[in-house]
C-alpha cells in the first residue's frame, strides 16, 4: 500500500490543496494530515482533528515517502504522528519538521529514520522549505502545482542539511512554551 492509499483509505487527509502524480513514478501531496481525529458527532459529521501535521509537503514513490515536511504545533505530537505514518518512512527519506514549541534546532533519529527539526514561529512551511532549498518564489511563479512540488523535491535532493545531532529525548527537552505568532491585518 502506498502512503497516499493509506491516507485516503483511513480518511487521514485534511484540507488538501494538491494530491496527485507529479511524475510517472512520484506522487505529491500538500495539505494537512490527521494525527488524532476530532470527535465524531454522527455518521457524517466529525469535528476538526484534535491534532494534525499542518502544511504538509510530501513526495512518495511506491510504498515509501521520499520527502516530507510539515508543521507540528508541539514536538509532543511527533510520537503519535510517527505511530500513525512511520511505516512509510525509511532511512533514505528526507524529513523536515517545523515545530512551533522548539527552543532550538536539531537532527535526530527515531526508529532508524532521520528527522531534521527546526523552530517555527511566524513563517510557513512552504517558505521555510524554499529557504532550505535556496529557491525563490519567482523560481516557481509560472509552474503548475505538481511542477512546484517536483522542483522543490529536486532541489531538496541536492541540499545538505546542517546537522546538529541530538537524541529524541534531547529534542523533547527542547520543548518550550512558544506559540505561533499570528500575522495579518492589525
Image (spheres, grey):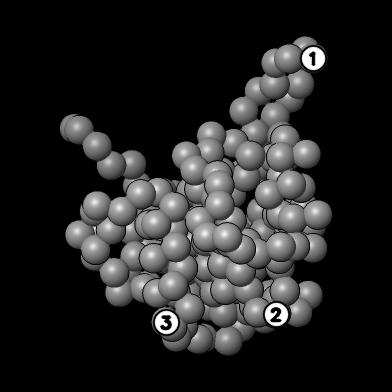
Describe the element under mark 2 as helix, strand or loop: loop
Describe the element under mark 3 as helix, strand or loop: loop
Q: Nearer the viewer, residue 20 or 65?
A: 20
**Of the residues under marks 3 and 2, which one precedes in the sequence?**
2
**Of the residues under marks 1 and 3, which one precedes in the sequence?**
1
Q: Which mark is residue 91?
A: 2
Left or right of residue 81, residue 22 in this image: left
Give how far apart the Cα atoms at labels 1 and 3 are.
46 Å
In percent of width and height, residue 166 lies at 61, 83
**Of the residues under marks 1 and 2, which one precedes in the sequence?**
1
In percent of width and height, residue 89 lies at 71, 68
Q: Nearer the viewer, residue 144 or 159?
A: 144
In percent of width and height, residue 178 lies at 45, 55
Left or right of residue 113, residue 107 in this image: left
Are the residues tagged 1 and 3 within 8 Å (C-beta)?
no
Residue with the mark numbered 1: 43
Total marks shown come to 3
User: Quarter of the image containing the N terminus?
Assistant: bottom right
Q: Which mark is residue 118?
A: none
Residue with the mark numbered 3: 159
Most distant residue in the front direction: 24
Amino acid at each position: 500500500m502506498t502512503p497516499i492509499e493509506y491516507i485516503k483509505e483511513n480518511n487521514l487527509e485534511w484540507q488538501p490543496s494538491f494530491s496527485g502524480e507529479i511524475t510517472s513514478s512520484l506522487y505529491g501531496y500538500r495539505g494537512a494530515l490527521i494525527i488524532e481525529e476530532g470527535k465524531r458527532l454522527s455518521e457524517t459529521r466529525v469535528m476538526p482533528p484534535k491534532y494534525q501535521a499542518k502544511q504538509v509537503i510530501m513526495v512518495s514513490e511506491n510504498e515509501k515517502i521520499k520527502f516530507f515536511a510539515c508543521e507540528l504545533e508541539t514536538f509532543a505530537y511527533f510520537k503519535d504522528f510517527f505511530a500513525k505514518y512511520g511505516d512509510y518512512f525509511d532511512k533514505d527519506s528526507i524529513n523536515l519538521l517545523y515545530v512551533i514549541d522548539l527552543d532550538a534546532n536539531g537532527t535526530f533519529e527515531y526508529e532508524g529514520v532521520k528527522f531534521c527539526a527546526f523552530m517555527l514561529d511566524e513563517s510557513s512551511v512552504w517558505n521555510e522549505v524554499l529557504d532550505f532549498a535556496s529557491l525563490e518564489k519567482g523560481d516557481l511563479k509560472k509552474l503548475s502545482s505538481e511542477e512546484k512540488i517536483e522542483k522543490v523535491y529536486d532541489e531538496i535532493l541536492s541540499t545538505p542539511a546542517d546537522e546538529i545531532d541530538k537524541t529524541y529525548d534531547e529534542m523533547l527537552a527542547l520543548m518550550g512554551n512558544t506559540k505561533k505568532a499570528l500575522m495579518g491585518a492589525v
